[in-house]
Image (spheres, rainbow, N blue to C red):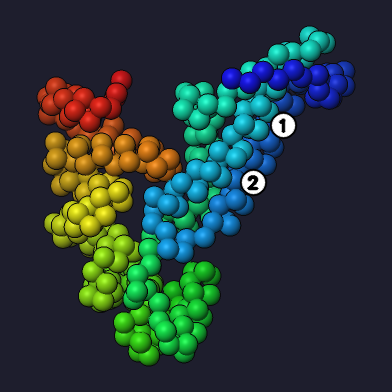
Amino acid sequence: MKKIILATALFCALSVFGQSEINENEIKKNIASQALNIFTDQACECMDSISVSNKNMADVSQEISRCIDSVVIGFQMTDKLLSIDTTKQEDITMEINADPNSTEYRSYYHRIENILLADCAALQRLMGTSNRESEFSYSSNSQALNEYNEGMEFLEKQDYKAAVKHFEKAVKIDEKFAFAWDNIGMCYRRMDKYDKAIESYNKSLSIDPKGEMPLVNLPVVYELQKDYAKALDAYLKLQKIYPLNTEGFYGAGRILFLMEKYEEALPQMCTAFLLYVKQKSPYRADAEKIIGLIYQKMKEQGKENEFRKIMNDSKINFE
């Protein structure tokens, strides 16, 4: 814990406002809101500069976490400053908790994280990233690369129809251009053309069977088609090839929940939750939510003891 001795201009400002008809609590509330916006904007700007080249989701999550960590202390300090009783005109000792493993620090971290999940486009883009390179990722053909790069410009604008034309031109020039096939799959998925998306992802995997991006996205398309059996098989395959990729466990847990196989879903979701916590991933909250839903379903079935046993075996405190 760090102790900071403060005698700040904020007290003077609040004292001036206090002489008017403006309510001091409203002033503090407005300042707090503006400060939180500043800190979340700073974190989002940091995330916008994160490169995803040759990184898996665990790598990206660590960099996302560092961006949030960079503003937690400032946010905590501002929040505590605004809670000080400004009627006491004296130096005040304020404790700032800089321990990233502490409950207090994590509460500030999660407040920032939750806002970013909803409002930061850069974070939303990064959380959909899985872009580990292999020898087949790019093309050595300059013409194919030019088409790919043009496609990426349209992809950034979410113009999937225009983007897919360039990616398809790229694979006509170089049919082993795996990343181009990946993005063809992504575009068709966004355009709700699921069969074409599956065909494209499978083409990419025929070139590079360990391609992380198609392995992550293929089960998503099966799920959109309500083909839960194929989606589950695809998530289990992802687990085997990339055991540290949390999406394999989270996806399998979610599919098993939809299939009403709650006792099978729970260990998968517990593994996902623990990996998300370890990786400091914002998706931790999603896993926690589904664990709560599984609890409700198992409680309805009179299986609370089975639920608690699985949670204890996973070393997760559900209370």
- Residue at figure coordinates x 22%, y 34% from the top left: 294
Identify the amino acid type marked 2.
Gln
Q: Which residue is mark 2?
A: 42
Where is residue 101 drawn, in percent x and y? 46, 28
Q: Residues within 10 Å of mark 1 (few under 14, many from 20)?
A: some
Where is residue 180 drawn, in percent x and y? 38, 77
Q: Which residue is mark 1?
A: 31
Q: Which of the two discs, 1 and 2, labels the residue nearer the N terminus?
A: 1
Res 184 seen here: no
- Residue at figure coordinates x 31%, y 38% from the top left: 273
Callout 1–callout 2 Cβ contact below 8 Å:
no
Quick check: 176 left or right of 279? left
Instruction: State the image quarter where residue 160 is shown.
Output: bottom left
Identify the amino acid type marked 1.
Ile
For residue 184, above or below residue 63:
below
Res 301 seen here: yes
Q: Quadrant of the N terminus?
A: top right
Find numbered disc 2 in the image and state the secondary structure of the residue it sits on. helix
Where is residue 29 drawn, in percent x and y? 68, 28
Marks 1/2: CA–CA distance: 17 Å
Instruction: State the image quarter where residue 2 is shown.
Output: top right
